[in-house]
């Protein structure tokens, strides 16, 4: 499994929104500048986060994006799944994959299932709050 740029950037955006939260909306231009991510690329990631209910957006003057809940309530696995679609280590475990005709006889399937469980437990055991840098 390799987390793509989309997943890594989604985490960075969420951390930035959490670190700079003051109850208001943050302009994506500011987030893009602080995170050194192209605004155009962020415009492809944000709809995934909005559709997933992780952030909410407001158009117009004073608009932007903000978190929908506190950082402690965001498991990192949830954020990555919204951005990546799946965290499965192999295609046959992907929720969208058709069932494999070899799964009943596959000697490696238990290995991949255990790895997927470990990945899920680890990423769902960490929250956005764990990534926030405390302010002095």
Image (tube, rainbow, N blue to C red):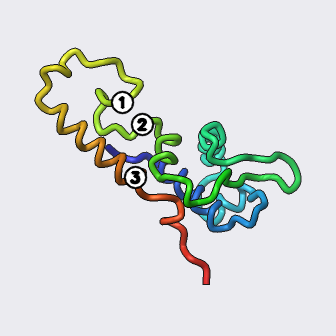
- Residue 92 vertical position relative to residue 7 in the rendered view, above or below: above
Q: CA distance from mark 3 to mark 2?
A: 13 Å
Q: Residue furthest right?
A: 61
Q: Which residue is mark 1?
A: 94
Q: Pick whichever, 91 or 39, lies toward us.
A: 91
Q: Pick whichever, 47 or 37, lies toward us.
A: 47
Please give left or right for residue 84 compared with residue 38 in the image: left
Please give left or right for residue 121 compared with residue 105 in the image: right
Q: Which mark is residue 69?
A: none
Q: Residue furthest top?
A: 101
Q: Which mark is residue 86?
A: 2
Residue 98's quadrant in the figure? top left
Foreground disc of the pair 3, 2: 3
Dividing the image into 4 quarters, which one contains the C terminus? bottom right
Residue appearing at x 20%, y 22% in the figure: 103
Q: Marks 3 and 1: in contact by CB < 8 Å?
A: no
Q: Earlier in the sequence, mark 1 or mark 2?
A: 2
Q: Secondary structure at mark 3?
A: helix
Q: Marks 2 and 1: in contact by CB < 8 Å?
A: yes
Q: Which residue is mark 3?
A: 123
Residue appearing at x 76%, y 62% in the figure: 23
Residue 52's quadrant in the figure? top right
Q: How many neighbours does mark 1 have within 10 angstroms: few (below 14), some (14-19), or many (20 or more)?
A: some
């Amino acid at each position: 499994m390799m987390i793509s740029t989309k997943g890594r950037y989604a985490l960075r955006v969420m951390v930035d929104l959490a670190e700079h939260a003051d109850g208001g909306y943050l302009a994506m231009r500011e987030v893009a500048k602080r995170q050194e991510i192209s605004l155009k690329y962020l415009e492809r990631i944000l709809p995934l986060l909005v559709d997933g209910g992780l952030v909410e957006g407001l158009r117009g003057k004073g608009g932007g994006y903000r978190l929908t809940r506190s950082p402690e309530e965001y498991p990192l696995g949830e954020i990555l799944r919204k951005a990546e679609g799946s965290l499965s280590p192999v295609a046959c475990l992907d929720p969208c994959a058709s069932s494999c005709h070899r799964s009943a006889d596959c000697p490696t399937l238990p290995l991949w299932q255990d790895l997927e469980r470990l990945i899920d437990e680890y990423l769902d055991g960490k929250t956005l709050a764990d990534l926030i840098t405390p302010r002095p």
